[in-house]
Image (cartoon, rainbow, N blue to C red):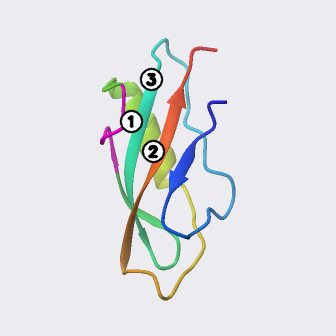
Amino acid sequence: DGAPSYSLGDRKVRQSLPEPRYDNQSEGVVAVEISVDRNGNVTKAVAGVKGSTTLDEYLLREARDAAMKAKFDRNDNAPLLQKGTITYIFKLK
């Protein structure tokens, strides 16, 4: 369906994942490796990791920017920085 998906252990996203801006003519899948602190904030996002099907700079930038706005549930028992991924599917509309 094109909605973003994520993997972060047993942690849940707080609201729905932020959608990236998308207004160009490229398509593909962009996987973003995220680092999330115990408060649920994304502190680092690296777009274009394994699972990506495009290295289009526009799509990588928009996916990274959207991933940085994601919020996850607080977990005081989580690692200081828990790594996971968010996957965005860009399809021509």
How far apart marks 3 and 1 lie (CA) works out to 13 Å
Q: Nearer the viewer, residue 20 or 8?
A: 8
Mark 3 = which residue?
A: 28
**In the image, residue 82 above or below residue 7:** below
Residue 50 magenta: yes
Mark 2 = which residue?
A: 65
Q: Nearer the viewer, residue 54 or 51?
A: 51
Mark 1 and mark 2 in contact? Answer it, CB < 8 Å. Answer: yes
Q: How many residues crowd mark 1 within 10 Å: few (<14), some (14–19), many (20+)?
A: some
- Residue at the spot x=47%, y=18% of the render? 27
Q: Quadrant of the N terminus?
A: top right
Amino acid at the residue labelled 2: Asp
Mark 1 = which residue?
A: 61
As helix, strand or loop, the secondary structure at mark 2 comes to helix
Image disc number at residue 16: none
Q: Which residues are magenta?
A: 46-53
- Residue at the spot x=57%, y=78% of the render? 74
Q: Where does the image place residue 40, in percent across and percent down from the top left?
A: 52, 71
As helix, strand or loop, the secondary structure at mark 3 comes to strand
How far apart marks 3 and 2 lie (CA) works out to 17 Å
Q: Where does the image place residue 73, in percent across and percent down from the top left?
A: 60, 73
